[in-house]
Amino acid sequence: MSRRRVGFGVALVAASVVLAGCQAAPEKGDGGDASAGCVRMVTNSGGLEDRSFNQSSWEGLQQAEEELGVEAEAIVSTSETDLAPNVEQAVQSGCGLVVTVGWELADPTLEQAAANPDVAFAIVDESVEAPNVKPVVFDTAQAAYLAGYLAAGVTRTGVVATFGGGNQPPVTLFMDGFVDGVAKYNEVHGTSVRALGWDKASQDGAFTGDFEDVNKGKTLAEGFIDQGADVILPVAGQVGEGAAAAALERDGVSIVWVDSDGYESLPADFRPVILTSVLKNTQDAMVTIVGDVQDDAFTADPYVGTLENAGVEIAPYHDLASLVTPELDGEIEGLRQAIIAGEIVVESPSAP
């Protein structure tokens, strides 16, 4: 299918946010040339400041504003019923690129992409197939493998844990990598560190059932701590803050954050318990995609973030660097290079 890309302009306009229901969608075709030079992003129901991929995607588009001179606007979904209307509103703006975030937006994205073949779409953290939709996905198992090895190397109790917000591939991909990293540490060092909360073989484990109820995260984390866990990886968006709160109340417990560097994105009160974070470099992916649309070089080929292309990584150890010996840090760097070279393949049924 041939596609014509709506060109971006060069005038820099301040970024803005539209709350679902606060602005009526324009009639079809109202945007036209008046809305050229812009990109619209639709969040999932986690909201814009989720300290996860909504927030990092938005930060990437703000960076594209500064570097490439486009006008970016976020349309914030507050419930599941907002999702499809918000994607339609984004399309009706007349912008050349629509970015949607999260698996919940897959169906609305595909529907609008089929109806609007001249618009470029990018969907973050979900794989869909359409000639004008670019999946932006991350092999987070690679970086989570390093985090699992790190957790096994610093635990004083011999017990670590992980839990998710829901049993979904973008979540369980982290969990697969994490437990495999723990297993690798045990193999190398002849130890028997246990990883609670996830059984890779059965692809089942501990989940809170949502990504917003912080109290659920705290309760689940407290249960793991009571079983001896002193390093916990929550893969649950805002719910993970509950795990960080539980760690603050117990001596010697630390957290591995996900998506963004939790040391920077979470409230400063949590900094003493952030061991590291499994990062997705969504920001650079957004800038690249905007540039591709500008240059008429957009394709539907997936962007897959890996250790090799710096799309995934683990964050610095910050305040807890003293827990990581030079020897352990060197082992983690060796594993990073082995994964990049293909000598170690981190496998997961959820891999992109």
Image (spheres, rainbow, N blue to C red):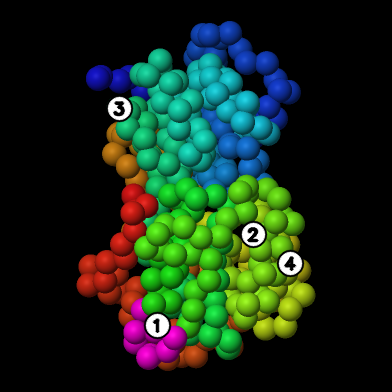
The residue stretch that appears in magenta: 184-192
Residue type at mark 2: give it.
Gly
**Mark toward the viewer: 2 or 3:** 2
Would you say the residues marked 3 and 4 are in contact, meaning their CB atoms lie under 8 Å apart?
Answer: no
Classify residue 109 as left or right of residue 320: left
Residue type at mark 1: give it.
Tyr
Q: Quadrant of residue 218?
A: bottom right
Q: Would you call the spot at circle 1 few (<14 residues within 10 Å), some (14-19), or many (20 or more)? A: many
**Mark toward the viewer: 1 or 3:** 1
Q: Would you place residue 303 above or below residue 196 in this image?
A: above
Q: Would you place residue 87 above or below residue 57 in this image?
A: above
Pointer 1 or 4: first along the chain = 1
Query: Mark 2 = which residue?
Result: 240
Q: Position of residue 116 (x, y in %)?
A: 40, 17
Residue found 26% across the figure and 71% down from its top: 344
Q: Would you place residue 15 above or below residue 341 in this image?
A: above
Instruction: Decide whether the magenta segment is chiefly helix, strand or loop.
Output: helix
Residue 131: image tag: 3
